[in-house]
Image (cartoon, rainbow, N blue to C red):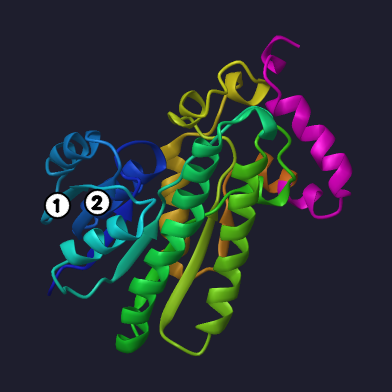
Amino acid sequence: MDRQFAIVTGASTGIGLELARICAREGCDLLIAADEPEIETAAARLRNEPGAGTIEALHVDLATQEGIEALYAAANGRPIDLLMANAGRGLGHAFLDQQLARIRDVIDTNITGTTCLLHRVGNDMRRRNHGRILITGSIAGFTPGSFQAVYNASKSYLNSLSFALREELRDTAITVTCLMPGATETAFFERADMLDTKVGSEAKDDPAMVARQGFDAMMRGEGDVVTGLKNKIQSAMANITPAERLAKQHRKMAEPGSARH
């Protein structure tokens, strides 16, 4: 039996690396990608996983159309069975204090690059009427993100896109699942310059747990999965809480210096 072929983006660390590890252990052939050279180290580690198939790594800028096309080309025309669109950027501090270049990087990575990849691979899957897609959204997408404004807005976009695409593909053999974790123990908060915030300094979820729940939900064809009981409660409350109050609550978690309060 042929091995399934999976693509995982943002797979050098964190949730993406754990998703790739699960794929390797499940015997998939893998193409993993990230915009940092550590993706090669990740690939070397994954090749040691029991049952791992072929594992290829690509160091590429997933915030650009050229990067997405390079990733697609690296599949060498092989049908993609599983797509895990996980690459993402975070950014802390007040919107007007952020550098515009970093704001654009969040938008280009989380929104533009992911959208281009989904469109490219999704059309192939539709032609074959086969495939599973996992999009890493976030419970952050339910809340106006004071001091994380662009990031939360980008995750709101991904959450919404995921549900819409799933409905459009309802009568096909293609499934779309949205993974919506909360704060997870990854390099995210350091990269987003949020280590001095309450959310950045508190205990967080295990990325291996988050990835396993996301992968299993994808394989079952479920529409979405919110990981962790605390996050399930938080997302449920967000649906009935006025946006203005949510924004005030988010300030307490994400404002610079909030870790000391």
Which residue does the image show at 24% across and 51% down from the upper left?
Answer: 32
- Amino acid under disc 2: Ile
State which region is magenta: 235-261
- Mark 2–mark 1 Cα distance, whole angstroms, equals 6 Å
Q: Tell me which corner region of the image, top left, top right, bottom left or bottom right, holds residue 133.
A: bottom left
> Which quarter of the figure is the C terminus placed in?
top right
Q: Main secondary structure of the magenta part?
A: helix
Residue farthest to the top, as pictured: 260
Which residue does the image show at 20% across and 57% down from the upper left?
Answer: 30
Which residue does the image show at 23% across and 39% down from the upper left?
Answer: 39
Q: Is residue 247 magenta?
A: yes
Dot 2 lies on which element?
strand
Pointers 2 and 1 in contact (CB under 8 A)?
A: yes
Which residue does the image show at 26% across and 49% down from the upper left?
Answer: 33
| Image coordinates for residue 206, horizontal then vertical, percent | 47, 34
Q: Is residue 155 left or right of residue 128?
A: right
- Amino acid under disc 1: Glu
Q: Is residue 175 left or right of residue 168?
A: left
Q: Which mark is residue 32?
A: 2
Q: Tell me which corner region of the image, top left, top right, bottom left or bottom right, holds residue 14.
A: top left
Dot 1 lies on which element?
strand
Q: How many marks?
A: 2
| Image coordinates for residue 125, horizontal then vertical, percent | 34, 80
| Residue at which label 1 appears | 56
